[in-house]
Amino acid sequence: MTEIFGVPIQALFGQLMLGLVNGSFYAVLSLGLAVIFGMLNIINFSHGALYMTGAMLTWIGLEYLGIGYWWMLVLAPICVGIIGIAIERLMLQWLYKLDHLYGLLLTFGLALMIEGLFRDLYGVAGQPYSIPEELSGAFNLGFMFLPKYRAWIIVASLSVCLATWYVIEKTRLGAYLRAATENPKLTQAFGINVPLMVMLTYGFGVGLAGFAGVLAAPATQIGPLMGSNLIIVVFAVVVIGGMGSILGSVVTGLGLGIIEGMTKVFWPEASATVVFMIMAVVLMIRPAGLFGREK
Amino acid sequence: MMKRKLLTLAISAMLMPAAGSAMAQAKGKISGDVVKIAVLTDMSGVYSDLGGKGSVVAAEMAIEDFKAQFKPKFKIDLVSADHQNKADVGSNKVREWYDTQGVDMVTDVLNSGVALAVAKVTTEKNKIMLNTGAASTRLTNEDCAPNNVVHYVYDTYALANGPGKAVTKQGKDSWFFLTADYAFGHSLEKDTMEAVKANGGKVLGAVRHPLNASDFSSFLLQAQASKAKVIGLANAGGDTINSIKAANEFGITKGQTLVGLLTTVVDIHALGLQTTQGMMFTEGFYWNLNKETREFSRRFFSRHKKMPNMLPAGTYSAVMHYLKAVQATGTDDTAAVMKQMKATPINDPFAKGGKIREDGRMVHDMYLVEVKKPAESKEPWDYYHVKQVIPGDQAFQPMAASRCAAVKK
Amino acid sequence: MNRRVTVAYLFGLGLLLLAPMFIYPILVMKVLCFALFACAFNLLLGYTGLLSFGHAAFLGTAGYVTGHALKVWELPTLLGLLVGTGAAALLGWVIGSLAIRRQGIYFAMVTLALAQMVFFFFLQAPFTGGEDGLQGVPRGTLFGLDLADDINLYYLVVAIFAGSFWLIQRAIHSPFGQILKAIRENEPRAISLGYDVAKYKLLAFVLSAGLAGLAGATKTLVFKFATLTDAHWHTSGEVVLMTLLGGMGTVFGPLVGATVIVTLQNELADKVGSLVTVIMGAIFVICVLAFRRGIVGESLALYKRVIGQKPL
């Protein structure tokens, strides 16, 4: 086995791949946060809980209803999106006139409720979910062992990010969306139903989280705590990237995932904190974030 | 003016409760005429399948059997709580139990981190802890409390020595550890390292993972990079199950041998024989040993829908032994009951000729088992070949090596 | 302090002194620790308008440092408490200097992320005992009194709480407190009046972190135990909830909120298990949607409506 810097090449590429996988999750989740923030001006604290809900639904679908992975890949994000729309209509919309911090507090409370509910139903231990047959097994690339499912996570999440970018930047719908973000009152005056767009944006944003949850289901333990641990890292990713641009959040997410993966090779003790350290440094040098604009 | 008046009032009030707290403790034979037993365990987390509700069921069975057999004059109460694998939750709960509920004895207490904390509270309040769940040898060594704490079922020394010797002797002599990052994992890792070295093997390193980790792949890649012949899993419950699964996904099992150091029959049941065949480890109880164990285990199965592993079986034995001691001495006074328990040998489905040593270690036979091939299994839960019965005095750390300050001569 | 607050303060103090005759003293001490934590937090959220989502870091840091100081360095109890409080204030200065570079929602996220970093540090640092926690911290003695006796410790905790509470009141009503309120109401105006806003924010942050630290140090003393739970983001969320429920920006709100939440958790834990988290979340949602002034704030408003005058 060849070695680079005293590390077997197989382990190095293995960790790089795992870093990319984590980075894909960061990218999808921070993209969802950015889309929601752009439109509603709130930070969605329940994002992690809804990501977990997506994974839980995938498991429940198979366990109780016999619905397989591929169907759930479509159904679970839709269900999560509908939950999101309900949250927006029933609660969030009453808070737009208040300080934005109330949105954060409300979604934090919701996150606790969702997490507690699943905890009560299924315990904290985590449920197993087998990899769908089409994607089980691995490619042996010679220099590394690449499980097919991990490769699929990267491909699927990057495709979704790209599609989202295309819709927002290149289509008419996206143009409305950007207009409504920039100046809601004026857009409303042009006859566009802004509240409807806000509602759908929130639904879409959390739907993305649900999608990430389905992707994660076979790769990790499906437990009530999987979302909250991840979302705090994603917050740091968002602070580092700034929420100015869609591509910015995707690039930051992927990049930090890779950096984290490499830290696991060369300095494992720091791998849990490296993203936060980078955040501290970015705050000192460029408080608005790498892709953010000073207001 | 008024401010000062209120202040003097307040200060005089301060002195009153001092008198109230001096309330003399009833020195009756059995405090409150009730013997109160508490099961503290993990009800919903990664270890809940090891002990959890199964331990509560076992304690209930012991109380029923005791009542039927001895017709005691005193009342027996059972309470239980979930410590969520958090040492603070566990020790605060136990403190409250002792202070306000009159609990006399606490059992199960799986998770070594929790157990160490609970042992401290138990010693402080001079009650009894019959630990049937936690593994760390610290409980009878550095943190021993022989007047209050009994380490009843197994410990990391006993777990380490069986496979540490057997596997190394097979020529798989270089080890790397995947270790749960808290007291239990640390003890198991340390004790196994010593066992491996004593048998001529070498240790290449270790990687620590958090309790209830969600993804083991990156830790396993580190283990793979070590090129060790054996990856020792110094973890338990759900963590062990998930490590073995991830190792299969990444093709690690092809080149390296996985040894689950704390594996019990319920883990094998969860993973299936296909994945686990050929694995070797030490367990303190197997349901299919003899007529008595089968009879007990079937009774347990009819209530809990799972065969007992060593934790519930040990909890049954511990509660029974404790109640017998209370019956014999006619008191729930800690010193008297501990003395009686240490003086009496233990003979029940769990242990034959078991004996509580002066350092609090309960010494009994352990079993080195190998998991059967799927074809060899004749009925559900028929999982083990018992390769060797390790006699108690070899299974556990000898007194001569004890690091317990209270019994050192 | 004005007269009504003083009367309420002394009345409450009297109740506290008598409480251990009727209630399990450990529970009251736990309530007091969290009440102090919430009061410290309120200083920042209620009076300066800064929402920190990482205050557990200070509670946890002081807990560990005090635990280490008492157990390993074998310092006298009071000195141990002071060292822990000082460490929390120092950490407050570091985190505060970074966090005040951003405002509003970003401020909340930055504090949360930095607190998580502190959490991971404690998880891995050898002196904290990781998951096992820092166990067996001795309580020591004070003026010859053995604090291992719950009643003796109880009166020390009451003294710490009463003293800190009084200190917070003094801070709020001082010129310093007035400037903080000015920043909360209108930051650009405070800047244009020539105040160095960043300096005042940082000072408030450090003060709040230090007092939160004192709460954590005291809690370690009560439970003889410093744990990761204290540094976990859940605890950061809990203190927000206590303050919100009691009434942010009110004098007694955090105390009321902490009492309600701690008692509720204690009563419900065995009965409903994990549903406690759901109930906490629901209280959060209800507070935000319909009850933003909290128990004390709403009661004062009601009082004002009924009596038709300003109550305080």
Image (cartoon, grey):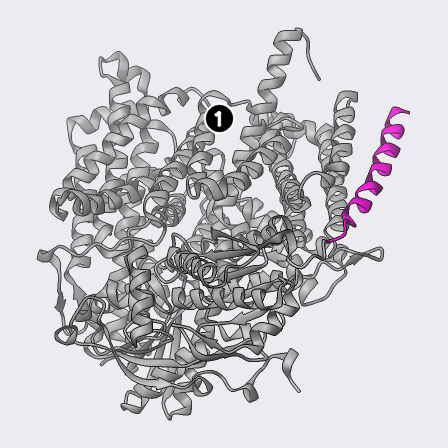
| Residue B248 vertical placement versus A164 (above, below) | below
Q: Is residue C207 visible?
A: no
Q: Quadrant for the N terminus of chain B, please.
A: top right
Q: Chain of mark 1?
A: C
Q: Position of residue C206 (x, y in %)?
A: 64, 44
C45 left or right of B376 in image: right
Q: Residue at x 66, y 87 (%)?
A: B409
Q: Which residues are magenta?
A: B1-25
Residue B11 on the magenta span: yes
Which residue position is annotated with label 1? C287
Residue A236 on the magenta span: no
Q: Amino acid at mark 1?
A: Cys
| Residue A214 vertical placement versus A273 (above, below) | above
Name the chief secondary structure element in magenta. Answer: helix
C200 left or right of B58 in image: right
Quadrant assignment, res C49: top right
Q: Residue at x 39, y 64 (%)?
A: B312
